Image: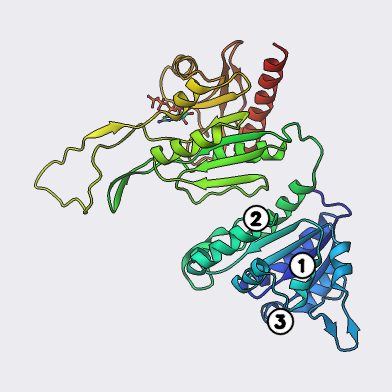
Amino acid sequence: MSLQGKKIVLAVTGSIAAYKTPHFVRLLVKAGAHVRVLVTDAAAQFVSPLSLATVSKHPVLANVNDGATWNNHVEMGLWADAMIIAPCSANTLGKLANGLCDNLVCAVYLSARCPVFIAPAMDEDMWLHPSVQANISKVRSFGNNIIPVAHGELASGLVGDGRMAEPEDMVTHLSVFFSEAGKPLKGMNALVTAGPTYERLDPVRFIGNFSTGKMGIAIAEALANKGAQVTLVLGPTHEHAIYPGINTISVESAQEMYEACITAFDSAQIAVLAAAVADYRPKEQAKEKIKKKENELTLELAKTTDILAGLGKIKKPWQTLVGFALETTDELENARKKLKEKNADMIALNSLNDAGAGFGHETNKITLLTQEGAPIALPLQSKKDAATAIVDHILELQHAQKIS
Ligand code: CTP
């Protein structure tokens, strides 16, 4: 990842995650960036400005004026190729959303003409509060880039959403944003589904599966990496996409996933359906918790809508539709059947008989089937590399569609 020569203003605000910022600055400098650091008063309680000055090799600025010297926030805003506010506290987020300006960080933010990245960090309940979510939507609508929060242990001891993205992920985020080369999908929209679906049985139980969503997320990132604007319809999972250019819509059930897909498919040139969608849902969803019975309990299940088949029916000639097939027996034959019956342009076949392939693994072994031509067997490789290979084949399909 290279940020060679990029000028980056890092604004650190008051959150425990500020302790990670000297490491973040080191990674930015290592990637070739020139970094200037600003801190709020609250940030300076969590991380030493001396550490940040040492790793960035420049004085750290805290106030609009330091006694006799006025720090020119306009100049700083114009100097930067990007500003990143990390960690961004709930308090600073509120100020950014409302145009308040009571410190140097806010003054530089309001003066900046460069892209601004915001990496929120707070406790989960704060993060989920409607006022914070409204502020996130508001700052996003101003054109700022939100770096998604991560899931994990929080300073409160609770486990949940709200952690600042890891410094390595933030560097990736900035590098992808700046790498303009090789963006053949620029201006195109893509739809990707990933993860499992949960079909509710009663208020506390569901029918689900072991999908983690890693493969679909890797595809969303590979498409975004090539310049596409991606809508990622993601079932319940703790995994998330980190790249810019991906709008994640979180859903729970097959029906919710279907509805989100129908809306996004309308303007999508490419759709890759990698989710492990439940084929059946409980016929009735009990309002109260189902009580234990004497012996057996019989559940009646109803079929869910097949999203891939549904999109296959309404597909236009300018759209490329890709599905997955997870098979345990007669793999090629079953996958070919899905390709035809669901009217897909390509099926990525995983066999559970291949070691290192399928749910939860970091690797995958995929065979690509298209309407014409022989199956293409890809090697066992990381899900990231497999995703890149799939996207490369989608580009070839699109090219063939254009010239036919
Ligand atoms: N799929 C879908 N909607 C469903 C079920 C599956 O969009 N309700 C999609 C999956 O995302 C995948 C493809 O269809 O792209 C094949 O999924 P798979 O589970 O392998 O096959 P099924 O059609 O469900 O058939 P079976 O479970 O009998 O193998």
Return the x and y of residue 403 as percentages of the image width and height. 73, 13
* Amino acid at pointer 2: Ser
Would you name the residue on which mark 2 appears? 141
Left or right of residue 300: residue 247: right
* Residue 110 marker: 1
The alpha-carbon separation of the residues under discs 2 and 1 comes to: 15 Å
Could you tell which of marks 1 and 3 lies nearer the N-terminus? 3
Q: For this view, does 94 lie left or right of residue 27?
A: left
Gap in angstroms between the C-alphas marked 2 and 3: 28 Å
Q: Is mark 3 on a helix, strand or loop?
A: loop
What residue is pinned by disc 3?
41
Q: Residue furthest left?
A: 294
Q: Residue at x 56, y 29 (%)?
A: 365
- Residue drawn at 71 percent across, 82 percent down: 41
Amino acid beneath label 3: Asp
Q: State the CA–CA distance, disc 1 to disc 3.
A: 18 Å
Q: Is residue 232 left or right of residue 179?
A: left
